[in-house]
Amino acid sequence: MIEKTAAELSQALSSGELSSTELTQSYLDRISRHNRKLNAFITVCEESALEQAKAADEKRATGDKSPLLGIPLAHKDIFCTKGVITSCGSHMLENFVAPYDATVVEKFKTAGAVMLGKTNMDEFAMGSSNETSFFGPVKNPWDLKRVPGGSSGGSAAAVAADLCVMATGTDTGGSIRQPAAFCGITGLKPSYGRVSRWGMIAFASSLDQAGTLSKSAEDAALMTNVMAGIDSKDSTSIDRPAEDYTATLNDSLDGLRIGIPKQHFAEGLSAEVEQAVREALKEYEQLGANITEVDLPNNHLSVSAYYVVAPAEASANLSRYDGVRYGHRCENPIDLEDMYKRTRSEGFGDEVKRRILVGTYALSAGYYDAYYRKAQKIRRLIKNDFIKAFEQVDVIVGPTSPHTAFGLGSKTDPVAMYLEDIYTIAVNLAGLPGISIPAGFANGLPIGMHIVGKDFGEGKLLNVAHQFQQQTDWHKRKPNFEPAD
Amino acid sequence: MALDKSEVEKIAQLARLHISEADTDEVASRITDILALIDQMQSVNTEMVEPMAHPLDVTQRLRVDTATEKDRRDELQTLAPAAQDGLYLVPKVIE
């Protein structure tokens, strides 16, 4: 049963053939058996998970049929959880216990979901391989010598390896979609502002967005139903009426207009990924979709602009880690300046320091117009490309990543790592929703297909993804990482 | 543009980060590579383009100026590395 989707398990819980306590215990057993190998969880909450499961079973007994009631999930360790350590993958926050729950965490609690624990991630979500985590890299369940992607690599690996039913993640430049692609699962990044950022440790505030990692698009819809909505505690959350994302899953795709950006099928894309995505497009044609080429002429500038906007905002956001109010403080500082410097140098890893330095440089006197303002103008050009493309099409489809999961330790050059997100970053800069779904395999490794929607087009994306999953079984394939007994 | 050692030291000081003498060259070269990536955007003419701060061009929502948070000082100060009598303790600033 551990391999089932939330939608399937919800039915089993509802009919009484299964209790949340049994289900939760099965995942906890599986985590204790496999987490050492995968390193997907930083913290496991055995006791509180079983208490929450018991409470969920009691609620079920009174006739409560909330879809996620009693469903075991994991939260990325970037979401503040009251009473449970929130490390953000960093030595800086290694022992930080937040005094409150993030809005996303609170919403899942209210929905009755059971929190199994907190998942590993790149430090402060800065990375595309999970190798920058202070707690060591996560291993890809499809090949333990490969990365799971990042930054939400722990969440992706945990879902793929059936250590939980579903998990939350965050996506600033591809951090949900790329690990979902590498681990063969479904990963949705909603539109900027659709989900509250309150209590989600800030990386780049104008780009960060919480989303879902799950075994199907239907599960992503169930999760987004819980997560989406305005929050008075996040002034950038958008005031839009609530939607039921499950209601449109079965809409027909007859006449759907799919755009494929020529820039996403150009040099740098591996042949097997291209082939898988083109095969998937044929599947959509069978379902009645019409495919046309679209032009995103400024896409090649997205990585450049991103590496100004994100580090600049990060350097400001991470200035709060000063050893005064919470987090790490160095031993025996000789004065305040020494305390700041040693606290931050000890607390942050190399990649985080590198981005703080780049951001500080871009924002320093005399450079603001040349860097931050210029990048904001490029952002406008990128958004305009999408607006123009969406005049002709309903969704845009391409590969999530240029290739399948790469080897642990194989990419040591930061710039090469940054270019990993070449297809996903523009979507964050434009604030659009994007989803990655499994679309094939190459040499036993999953391939992800990227679908991008209009502003607040999550419902359409989930519909398009769900219909594909009705025709294919890529999302049902399971990794075999267990040694033969 | 290539960053030299003194510029790296200047940025590190602004960011309150300590970079050891031994690491400075490596850091300078990595950041120079990143700036080369960033500089690709300088090739595009954006003179007439309006900068985009928010993907939906939404402006900040305002609320009534009243205190809504309760006083949680004692609870929050339990997180501090050093606090006493409601104050955060840091190394001596004024002799």
Image (spheres, coloured by chain):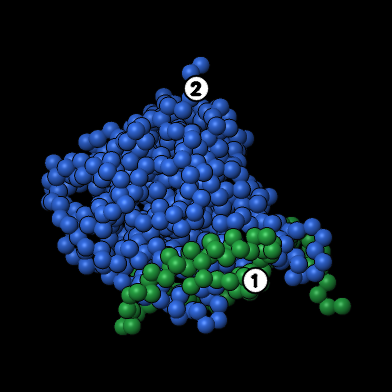
Chain colours: A blue, B green
* In this rendering, position of residue A90 left or right of residue A18: right
Q: Nearer the viewer, residue A180 or A8?
A: A180
Residue A157 in view, yes or no: no
Q: CA distance from mark 1 to mark 2?
A: 50 Å
Few, some or many residues within 10 Å of mark 1 (<14, 14–19, 20+): some
Q: What chain does badge 2 belong to? A: A
Q: Give coordinates of residue A1: x percent, y percent.
A: 42, 26
Q: Give coordinates of residue B65: x percent, y percent.
A: 55, 78
Label 1 and label 2 in one chain:
no
The part of the image, by quadrant, that contains residue A66 is top left
Q: Can you name the residue that lies furthest to the right here?
A: B95
The part of the image, by quadrant, that contains residue A215 is top left
Q: Secondary structure at mark 1?
A: helix
Q: Give coordinates of residue B49: x percent, y percent.
A: 32, 79
Q: What chain does badge 1 belong to? A: B
Question: Which amino acid, by three-letter code, is at mark 1?
Answer: Glu
Q: Can you name the residue that lies furthest to the top here?
A: A485
Instruction: List the residue tagged with mark 1.
Output: B9
User: Total label count?
Assistant: 2
* In this rendering, position of residue A275 left or right of residue A345: left
Q: Give coordinates of residue B11: x percent, y percent.
A: 61, 72
Instruction: List the residue tagged with mark 2.
Output: A483
Q: Residue at 43% of width from left, 36% of height from top? A: A160
Q: Nearer the viewer, residue A234 or A414?
A: A414
Few, some or many residues within 10 Å of mark 2 (<14, 14–19, 20+): few
Q: Residue at 14% of width from left, 45% of height from top? A: A285
Q: Nearer the viewer, residue A458 or A381?
A: A381
Q: Nearer the viewer, residue A197 or B49?
A: B49
Q: Secondary structure at mark 2?
A: loop
